[in-house]
Image: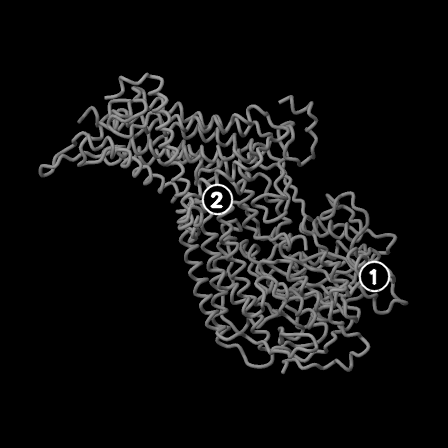
Amino acid sequence: MIVAAVPFALWLAAKAVVTLGLMLGVVLVVIWAELKWSAHIQSRVGPWYVGGRYGWLHPIAEALKFLQKEDLVPEAADDKVFRLAPYVMLAGTIATFAIIPIGPTVVARDLDIGIFYLLAISSLSTLGVLMAGWSSANKYSLIGGVRAGAQLIAYELPLILALVAVAIQAGTLSLNGIVAAQTETLFTIGGFDVALPFALSGQFIGFVVFIIASLAELNRTPFDLPLAESELTMGYVTEYSGLRFSMFFLGEYAGVVAMAAVISTVYLGGYWMPGISDDALDWLGPFILVGKIFFIVFLYIWFRWTWPRIREDQLQRMAWKWLIPLTLFNIMATATLKVVL
Amino acid sequence: MTDSPSETTEAPNTLGTFAADFAALVGAERWTADHGTVHVYLSRDQWVAAATAARDETELAFFSFLSAVDWAKEVAVGEPADDVENLDERYEVLCRLSSGTDDTALILSTSLAKDDAWLDSLVSVYAGAAWHERETAEMFGIDFHGHPNLINLYLPQEFEGHPLRKSFALGAREVKPWPGKVDVEELPSTENVEAAAQTDGEGS
Amino acid sequence: MTHLDHRGIVEVSDGGVSVELKGETMTLNIGPQHPSTHGVLRLIAEVDGERIARLDPAIGYMHRGKEKLAEARTYAQITALINRIDWVSGFANEVAFIRAVEELVGVEPTPRAQYIRLILTELTRISNHLVFASSYPLELGGATALMWAFREREHIMDVIESVTGGRFHTNFNRVGGVNPVAGGGKSQKKVSLDLPAGFYAAVENAMDRAEVACDELDQLVTGNEIIHMRAKGVGIITKEDALAYGISGPNARASGVDFDLRIQEDSLLPYGDFDFDVITGENGDSFDRYLVRILEIRESIKIVRQAIGSVPDGPLQAKVPRVLKVPPGTAYVRAENPKGEMGYYIVSQGGRIPYRLKIRSASFSNISIMSKIAVGQLIPDLVATMGSLDFVLGDVDR
């Protein structure tokens, strides 16, 4: 291939730009989808005029609107931390994209310790939230930030434990390896080789728990306590405006896409789809992955506009009393099956 | 005396009987029962005891409202009282108590001299009186002894004056006398009431 | 965070948002600008973490001094004022006041007017409860119910507008009946205004839609486990407290107070002609307050359905003098407003203007219990409790 001819740095930059561009493109579509789908759920029309039809340029228009607004920093705020927080949050989520395979050979970086990296880097965004909550010098922000911290501790564990079971079943920590493991033939019916994604073959509990925990990780309803508009006005983003607010906004949706991409990859077979050759997957893979991402995003949006918000103590109870024991059971079951089968 | 509690808790045949019974129960000298509204007139020292009796013996557990009327000869706003010359200047404090099961209800009324406007608080009898007494205190300048937190409810703490007193001018009316210029159609004057009295109710 | 101190921001205000934390508790200022305070209620909460140690409601940000304003207006002008007390149920505010004036004047409203008042009051009640039942999930974090119920409520607003000309501030009641004529001035011919053509069909349709809204709310909200987790057992008001604090209406009935002014002897409107149930709750918690209102919508729909079939013919207004002079006297007249007991104590001295008008509004007493039941709650519980009391700041401050 042409890879060898291009200097490493340039190649890296190109990969970064392509990955980022692709994923941010998806993020904009997801923002539009949230506006539009939520509108339809609520029997509204939603964005309509911007861009001529269906308001398809609405996310861009919103971004432009935010750019025009004054970038306010409260007088009592801790300037540097306050200004840095949105970027920390955004960086944490965007860095996740680096290891998501979008085709058999198309991945920004295939890490051996992919899951490990994923879990480490995704917690970074919560650090941004904590920074924002603390530095705003606003009590609502503070409570929001602390809530986010408590939520992180409670829900990172089910996430990790759910992925541990996946790693056991796949026998690797690399995301490419996990996708490859899901393409292996499980059994044959009438001459057809049947391969099932992990969500359908052994990791269903993990899949459900992971979706629930990811909602908490993303601060989405019913776990949007750090934002909790009706209680904390807007939680940790209360004091933000203009560009910095839009960074949080973008970070939130980038997080949604990143998490949906991880779920698609780990549990739904990622770029892979039965009946399509590996060569074709190189260019069809991204579309398949995006399709799966949108399935998960649709679930997220559906949940958000249907359910109310639970309370902090109920959230903790759910994590420690239900999700963690469930995932522990899941690990044991997976390990046992792995040895037996 | 027909004031045994068991009789008065039933819906009275007439408001008058009920009013008379209650007045006898609390030792009030005067009561009225006009327009479906029972007033029992008390002296200041009967106030809390009467409210307690209303709650415990007449089962008027529902605290409806507490407020006051400023009876003044000079009014800065609106029309003066009916018989101004013989008017006894005072604050009349009213407290309406009613039943939580039927339509039994009464209004306790007491008069306070203008230069000695204080009353014992009902908060210990009806917890809901707290806000009503705060409102009455700031609006009329009546002091409620024994109130746990008698600070202004609506107005800023540094506000001067008591807006619902008749001597308190209404700013909007000072700026623009009533009727204002926007009232294009002349309001019918009170002199030709008789002439204009019977207009057709249904229209033509 | 020592840098806060030498910038001198520490003592912005006691309830200020941006102040340094001192000691175990901090003062959290909820409102007057806050998404869940329904306008401009301000709650000064002392919180230990998220648990409320002390709560001090501060009201008055919407105090318009209606009682004072009423002392400078004729009775007819006052109806325009009192409409705006509880604007979510504007029409219902008028009825008790007009009945109080009628009581003092000694005029009996015509039966047709009474029925129209009753229908419009019940429509207002349905509309008010739909606003509550749909915005309550919003307080708990669910936004969709709001849109669904508001969509159906619009049919009711259309009906009210078609009869009265106003959606919120109807100003439709007159002493002796309801507004019989449109047009005005000396040159214009008066036009008779009765119920508009197609009124009954429109009401029937609006009732169907309101039932749809109830069904949808039941599906989306009433059975939702998260709503149960958030609202059941939260903000419990005992029966005794409800009475002592003067809590009325659905809030009191949720606490087990089986009392509805509509079925009392002194009911202002002919509710006795109709068959409906008074809904009461058992636990007095936030969920019961929600449930009572949802069920009350269904009862009100029943009442309206019965009423539109039996509106008597006749004039809309009894004969009353053009210049209304109210004989001296005092009367307190109360009505079952959607939010509770709405009463007017009128002191008349024989003029065109009341000497004193005391407005007893439901929300004022209803939220006065907040500082008692909020202690020990978490901030989310406070929002859940506050929302379930269904108050409007105009009705609190007057």
Q: Which mark is residue C5?
A: none
Which residue type carries mark 1?
Trp
In what quadrant of the picture does the C terminus of chain C appear? Answer: bottom right
Q: Is residue A337 above or below residue B142?
A: above
Residue sitting at 75 percent across and 55 percent down?
B49
Dot 2: chain letter: C
Q: Position of residue C132 (x, y in %)?
A: 52, 54
Residue sitting at 33 percent across and 17 percent down?
A8
Residue farthest along the right direction in this orientation: B85
Residue occupied by mark 1: B71
Q: Position of residue B13 (x, y in %)?
A: 66, 72
Q: Position of residue C369 (x, y in %)?
A: 62, 48
Residue farthest along the left direction in this orientation: A190
Q: Which mark is residue C141?
A: 2
Which residue type carries mark 2?
Gly
Label 1 vs label 2: CA separation?
Answer: 51 Å
Residue sitting at 12 percent across and 35 percent down?
A188
Question: Which residue is at the front of the view, C238 or A215?
Answer: A215
Q: Is residue C246 above or below residue A50?
A: below
Occupied quadrant, residue A80: top right
Label 1 and label 2 in one chain: no
